[in-house]
Amino acid sequence: VQLQASGGGLVRAGGSLTLSCAASGRTFSGYVVGWFRKAPGKEREFVAAIRWSGNNIDYADSVKGRFTISGDGAKNTVRLQMNSLKPEDTGVYYCAAHYSGFSSYIANDETGYRYWGQGTLVTVSS
């Protein structure tokens, strides 16, 4: 699975951005698609993930209530709608995927993901 992340940019605190993760080579059927971010000087951390078949969703506590992850079957794309952005949301955002088949398991650690896209930079100014 080849992943392409897009949608990053510069936004003021309190603003919104939508990131997209598109798959090429196959559909997301049977996969979990997640978003991770890496802030300067910090480890890469889990943000959110969605199981494509079944819509199981998981969020990091730091983004609950502000970020929404969703799938667009027609475009084979997973979106991350980010609202009420804070300066601490700044970082390079990566989308990733792992196969789940019929399991409802959603990995929230980067070691659980086999496929990775390139990052897209999100900068939130104060």
Image (spheres, rainbow, N blue to C red):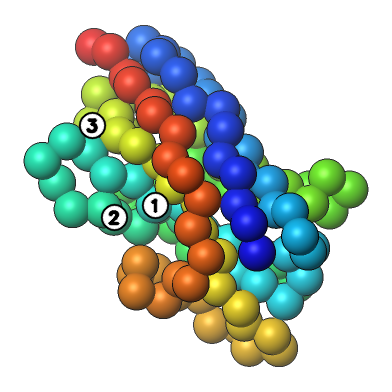
Q: Position of residue 56 (x, y in %)?
A: 62, 69
Q: Is there CB contact under 8 Å for labels 2 and 1? A: yes
Residue 15 in sight from this viewpoint: yes
The answer to whether residue 17 is left or right of residue 104 is left
Vertical position of residue 19 compared to residue 47: above or below: above
Vertical order, 124 against 100 (above or below): above
Q: Which mark is residue 36?
A: 1
Q: Amino acid at mark 2?
A: Glu
The x, y position of residue 96, in whole percent, is: 51, 59
Q: Which residue is mark 2?
A: 45
Find residue 83 and report its horizontal and vertical position in percent.
Answer: 48, 28
Among numbered discs 3 and 2, the one appearing first in the sequence: 2
User: Is the C terminus in the top left, top right, bottom left or bottom right quadrant?
Assistant: top left
Image coordinates of residue 102 in percent, x first then y, are: 71, 88
Which residue ends up furthest to the bottom in the rendered image?
A: 102
Which element is circle 1 on? strand
- Quadrant the N terminus occupies: bottom right
Look at 62% across and 38% down and name the residue there.
20
Give above or below for 126 relative to 24: above
Q: Secondary structure at mark 3?
A: helix
Image check: 67 left or right of 10?
A: right
Drawn side of residue 63 relative to residue 100, left or right: left
Indicate which disc residue 88 carries: 3
Q: Secondary structure at mark 2?
A: strand
Count residues near mark 2 (Cα–Cα under 10 Å), then give few for <14, some for 14-19, many for 20+: some
Q: Which amino acid type is shown beneath numbered disc 3?
A: Glu
Q: CA distance from mark 3 to mark 2?
A: 12 Å
